[in-house]
Image: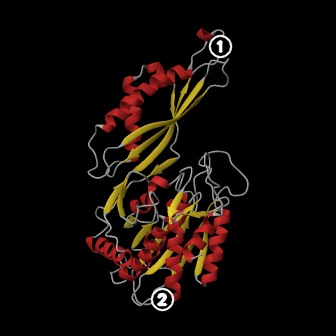
Amino acid sequence: MDAVTRLLSDLVAIPSVNPMGRVMSGPGVLEAGMTEYLAGYFQSLGVEYARVPIAPGRSNIMAWYHSNSSDFTVLFDAHQDTVPVDGMIIEPFEPKVEGGKLFGRGSCDIKGGMAAMLLAFARLVKQRPSGSASVVMACTVDEEFTHIGSSKLAETPEIADLAIVAEPTKLDIVDRHKGSIRWKIRANGTACHSSTPQLGDNAIYRMGRILGVLAEHACHLAGSTPDPVLGPPSLSVGRIEGGQSVNVVPDWCEVEIDRRVIPGEQSSDARNWVESDLRQKLGSNDFKSLEFLSPWVDMPPLSGEGRLTSTIIDALKSSIDVATGHQATVIGVPYGTDGGPLSAVGLPTIVFGPGDIAQAHTKDEWVELDQVRLAVEAYYQMVCTLGSLPARTKTPRRT
């Protein structure tokens, strides 16, 4: 078993499931086991590392490789968590290799990319190539739900000159993606016995009228001015819940909204626009019954405009070509990443990694091992090439 297969198998075998708002407990829930493994990995390399507490039982873990000959610093970011395993048709935490692919939860999103970053980091530490940039390796928590790990990391954008976020991009460079804001709208009514429904006020019926307005709003967004790469913004109602029992007229009903934000939009404006539309199109009684709950996700979009110079992009493309023979394309993607919070505070950020997003979160998740191997070389070559560039800021680095 080669180093890539061995390390990726270790990572997949450690459950690090994000409950994503559900009540879950027990071994393998949250990232503690993964954090412990990573601490041992960095300790074995003899490098400086630190845990950064984020929430109870959840810590980012960071490690440092210090170049002796460059002021440029690269941030490697890979998240520790995975989505849950509902509906999987393979054993999620028993990595299996077949046909050049490694199967298991998180293999594609994003433990394949994490393994590649870790091996590139280890090679830098051991070989200390002349002229390489320095590296801060950050393994963050809660990427799959509320991005609290990357939001904490974004509080110190001066730690690096460029962030490279591991996600499955098929070894292309992503410099642009949508953001998202997610919140609940609650309709209130009056409960009564279902045998006399005229004595109550059915909140589910009321929500039906609200959903009609939201559907119209979504259609309007689909026809609005698009981002030239990502297309238009979007809105989707993903969950609905309400009532106590079938024999009780429901006095509440809630929907969960996912609003995708394109570069140039403000998430607060997007949310206010929905509220304004409902105010205009609903009857006064329906609107007065509504509660707009605080968002639990507010993730900025990623846009490289004004931050990623052509010099950096050219250096990255050249590195990938040298390392892999793949002529990388600069693309945009509709999904969100840790890159959103990092870019929002002014840190130049790209997303790059092995695997195809089409395999992420699937019932038989897998990643091609050859792509992971190529990603190791690409990450290593990027750091070596970027070391020749001037630092973005003179803010003192951690030493």
Where does the image place residue 161, in percent across and percent down from the top left? 39, 74
Q: Nearer the viewer, residue 157 or 62?
A: 62
Residue 217 visible in rendering: yes
Element on which disc 2 rests: loop
Q: Residue at x 53, y 59 (%)?
A: 366
How many numbered tags mark residues here? 2
Q: Which mark is residue 11?
A: none
Task: Specify how the rendered protein is coloured.
Answer: secondary structure
- Ranked by sequence position, the earlier of labels 1 and 2 is 2
Within 10 Å of the Cα at label 1, are there few (<14), some (14-19), or many (20+) other Cα atoms? some
In percent of width and height, residue 267 lies at 40, 46
Q: Nearer the viewer, residue 288 or 267?
A: 267
In the image, 98 versus 252, the foreground residue is 98
Q: Quadrant of residue 394?
A: bottom left
Location of the N terminus by quadrant is bottom right
As measured in the structure, the alpha-carbon distance from the residue carrying label 1 to the one carrying label 2 is 74 Å
Which residue is the site of mark 2? 128
| Residue contact between numbered discs 1 and 2, judged by CB atoms under 8 Å | no
Callout 1: SS: loop
Q: Is residue 207 above or below residue 367?
A: above
Hey, what amino acid is under mark 2?
Answer: Arg
Q: Is residue 123 left or right of residue 334?
A: right
Residue 127 percent location from the top left of the image = 49, 89
Disc 1: which residue: 194
Towards the viewer: 221 or 169: 169
Is label 1 or label 2 in front?
2
Crowding around mark 2 (Cα neighbors within 10 Å: few <14, some 14 to 19, many 20+) is some
